[in-house]
Image: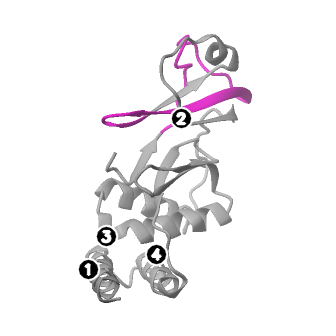
């Protein structure tokens, strides 16, 4: 699968029996790999155990279903700005932004907004990390670009520039493409 990342929202009904999921009850969340990407299934644990299937899950984890809460107040500057930027970048499907997407995901994980649920080593040598948003239950499948330490500071400064609004997505994307070309050229000469 050539897709480097993927975002799937939590269901509000059991994917097997189609009955509503109840707030604060256990659920089993599953990612199923398909030709078109990933399908997410959220099930009652007993439904998952009883379900007959002829496929192996890409990723599976136990969790607790949290019903959506209505937002009461609006903060002037929300902490979710990094999360909104991450989701926006993922919808663009720009391979040049893979380092920025990964650093944003790690930032949100360290802020306890995202939790890593799984890690998959793929046949092509890449690593896919499965994150879940603690608040709304969305699943994010993100390519781990295996950033080198010498490149981390540059990517972090790009993330800060995007969050502060001092650089546009186009500027950061062009920087990333230029850096990737330089790295490929350096690899070829060594």
Q: Is residue 23 above or below residue 116?
A: above
Is 10 colored magenta in this rendering?
yes
Q: Nearer the viewer, mark 4 or mark 2?
A: 2
Q: Is residue 9 left or right of residue 23?
A: left
Residue behind mark 3: 96
Q: Is residue 97 above or below residue 5?
A: below
Q: Give whichever of discs 3 and 4 has the lower sequence position.
A: 3
On residue 10, the disc is 2
- State the separation of the CA atoms marked 4 and 2: 26 Å
The residue lying at 67 percent from left, 27 percent from top is 27
Residue behind mark 4: 163
Residue 11 percent across, percent down from the top left: 52, 29
The residue lying at 55 percent from left, 20 percent from top is 13
- Where residue 47 sits, quadrant-wise, is top right
Q: Give whichever of discs 3 and 1 has the lower sequence position.
A: 3
Q: Give whichever of discs 4 and 2 has the lower sequence position.
A: 2
What is the quadrant of the N terminus in the image?
top left
On residue 174, the disc is 1
């Amino acid at each position: 699968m050539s897709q480097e990342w993927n975002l799937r929202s939590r269901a509000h009904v059991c994917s097997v029996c189609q009955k509503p999921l109840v707030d604060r009850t256990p659920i089993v969340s599953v990612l199923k790999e398909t030709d078109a990407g990933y399908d997410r299934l959220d099930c009652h644990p007993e439904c998952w155990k009883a379900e007959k299937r002829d496929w192996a899950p890409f990723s599976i984890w136990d969790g607790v279903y949290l019903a959506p809460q209505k937002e009461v107040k609006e903060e002037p500057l929300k902490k979710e700005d990094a999360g909104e930027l991450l989701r926006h970048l993922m919808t663009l499907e720009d391979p040049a932004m893979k380092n920025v997407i990964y650093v944003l995901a790690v930032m949100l994980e360290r802020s306890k907004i995202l939790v890593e649920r799984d890690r998959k080593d793929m046949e092509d040598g890449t690593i896919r990390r499965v994150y879940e948003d603690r608040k709304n239950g969305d699943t994010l499948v993100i390519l781990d670009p295996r950033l080198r330490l010498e490149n981390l500071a540059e990517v972090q400064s790009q993330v800060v520039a995007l969050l502060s609004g001092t650089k546009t997505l186009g500027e950061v994307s062009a920087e990333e493409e230029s850096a990737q070309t330089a790295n490929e050229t350096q690899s070829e000469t060594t």
